[in-house]
Image (tube, rainbow, N blue to C red):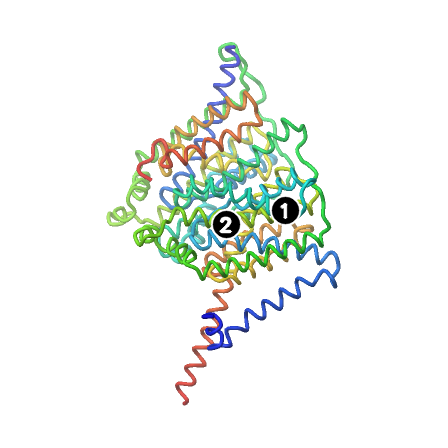
Amino acid sequence: MKLINEYKANPKKLILPVLVAALLVLLGLSPNFTKPYATIMLGTIMMYIILSLSWNMFSGATGYVSLATAAFFGVGVYVSAFFGSSLSLPLLMLMGGIFSFVIAFLVGAVTLRLRGVYFTIFTLGIVKLLEQLMLYLEITFNKTRGRFVVSYTFTEVFYWLFILMILVILLSVFIKRTRFGLALKCIAEGEDAAMHIGIGSTMVKILAFAISSFAMGAAGAAMATRWTYIDPYIAFSTNLSFLPVLMVIFGGGRHVFGPLIGAVVFAYIQELLITDFPYVYMLAFGVIMIVSIIFMPNGIVGVIENIVGRIKKAKGGRKNADP
Amino acid sequence: MLTTLINVLSSGLIMGGVYAIISMGLSMQYGVARILNVSHGEFIMLGAFLCFTLVRSHVHPILSMLLCVPVMFVIGFVLHRTIYKKLSDVSGSTAAFESNSMLVSFGLMFVVQNVALLLWGSEQKGYTFLMRSVKILGSPIALNRLLVLVFAVAISFAFYIFLERSRLGKAIRAVSQDPSAARLLGVRRTRVAAICFGIGAILAGCAGALITMINQINTSMGMNYTIIAIIVVVLGGMGSIPGSLLGGFILGFIGTVVNYIDPSLSLVAYYLIIIVLLLVKPSGLMGGKS
């Protein structure tokens, strides 16, 4: 009700959400009128949107840089590999999500005492540990490195990823408006101060970490059914840890649109370059990462906000000068 | 039995020596410049490939290692003077700089690795050098491994003495202990930080050059060394040079022993060590309070 009044008072605020909703509807209907190739590509883009938004939900909000994205994604992938033949796709995604949630909860409970760079190192260690452990187990007990995953058509995977993406977008917007989101923001701005004003910072962090991992695991479970063959190197590829970070840094983490824009831009560039110029792509990735951190602390969205702010100011200035 | 023991001992010393060199560089870069340089392994790779390229054009391996020193220093020094200097101007606090500089070094990792991939491709490369073996206590040891061992230990201790005795070394330690007090005493902090970053690159380059003498190399080898260096640094204590020296040899021996039992488990063992260590004592063996 409060929200409706807010929008009634300022109808201009409605433009952006309506525009996004229209785009989403168009995206949801796209498999009906685009080529299969486009559906596959859009599926990949949605995967990156899910990963970067869920990364931003915890790391962007709290400032704890987690590189464990690939670990939770990989857990989802292996859930699909193990249970693919007995469960349907939505159940696989749910199960991948739950597995990731539980693991993230446990990992978070023991590691979120660590601050700063220690936490980051630890999360990267988790990815590598799971990768090597899985490799060891597969080779010792299965005598092969990889496994085949039951496959679903890419349209089916597309729709389930689409639903997951909508949920993640809604959750991102929702969390920002709750006390929980405020608590996360407090932790980013000064954890000791946050604890002093009565925020159970450890529990808040662990929960946020686990919630964000749920989506990563679910995305992994869905993508695995599209790949049909997986091995530990594919499932726990460190690129899946780094890319969401870059996407959020490039897009800007303060606003929900930031990770969205970042994910779309990079997933598209990747699609264009990765087959013919893989090294150039990764090189550009590094350069853009460095340049964004130094010159765009609030990402593309921050730059746009700056420009819009300046235009408004200029307009306001003129009005004052010439009444 | 004795042969096995000597084998494990010598391998442990060689690995430990290389790890110690790598980790001291990383530790100093973090301790003084406040940069957790995740691209450290890529500088090792760069050093290895510079050395390899020189050897291919008929330069003696040891001479090529020495030629790597100034090149690596300039690369490290200039990187700090440009990117990291700019970044520290932009970042508001030390904590913000630490997290930003780590992310920048991730970016740098991709840049260096992919430039190397474009230049040298992704195949395994190597050359043969001093493949004869000598007998020590009745068990044969290859001469090139013995040479690497000597160099690794010599470089580690030379670096340690440089830090302890020289004027620049004292300035470096001063900045790592208390940046603002060091500045009050006339130490030019950013300059010292840039020099440290350059020295870190030298140590990485030397380690890379030493690795070419005993192992095959490829352009994606960096990441593993980065992780090993980080483990050693955490083991010894972030920013503590003696800690890295000790940690390097400890990890070298653990690695060799695990490798002897089951090679496919060595990385798992490393990760378990780092995870347990971070949970039990994040400040490391010789670190102060965290």
Q: Quadrant of the C terminus of chain B?
A: top left
Closer to the camera in the image, A180 or B172: A180
Closer to the camera in the image, B206 or B218: B218
Closer to the camera in the image, B270 or B26: B270
Would residue B66 be seen by someone viewing this image from the given angle?
no
Left or right: A55 with respect to A271? left
The correct choice, above or below, for A255 with respect to B210 in the image is: below
* Inter-mark Cα distance, 1 to 2: 18 Å
Left or right: A154 with respect to A175? right
What mark, if any, has residue A91 been given in the picture?
1
- Choose top left, top right, bottom left or bottom right for residue B166: top left
User: Which chain does tag 1 point to?
Assistant: A
Left or right: A50 with respect to B174? right
- Choose top left, top right, bottom left or bottom right for residue B117: top right
Label 1 Cα crowd, 10 Å radius (few <14 / some 14-19 / many 20+): some
- Which x, y percent locates residue A138? 63, 31
Nearer the observer, disc 1 or disc 2?
Answer: 1
- Which x, y percent locates residue B207? 49, 33
Q: Which residue is mark 2?
A: A211
Secondary structure found at label 1: helix
Would residue B109 be seen by someone viewing this image from the given angle?
yes
Please report the residue visible at 42 percent of the width from the left and 85 percent of the height from the top.
Answer: A319
| Type of amino acid under label 1 | Leu
| Type of amino acid under label 2 | Ile
User: Which chain does tag 2 point to?
Assistant: A
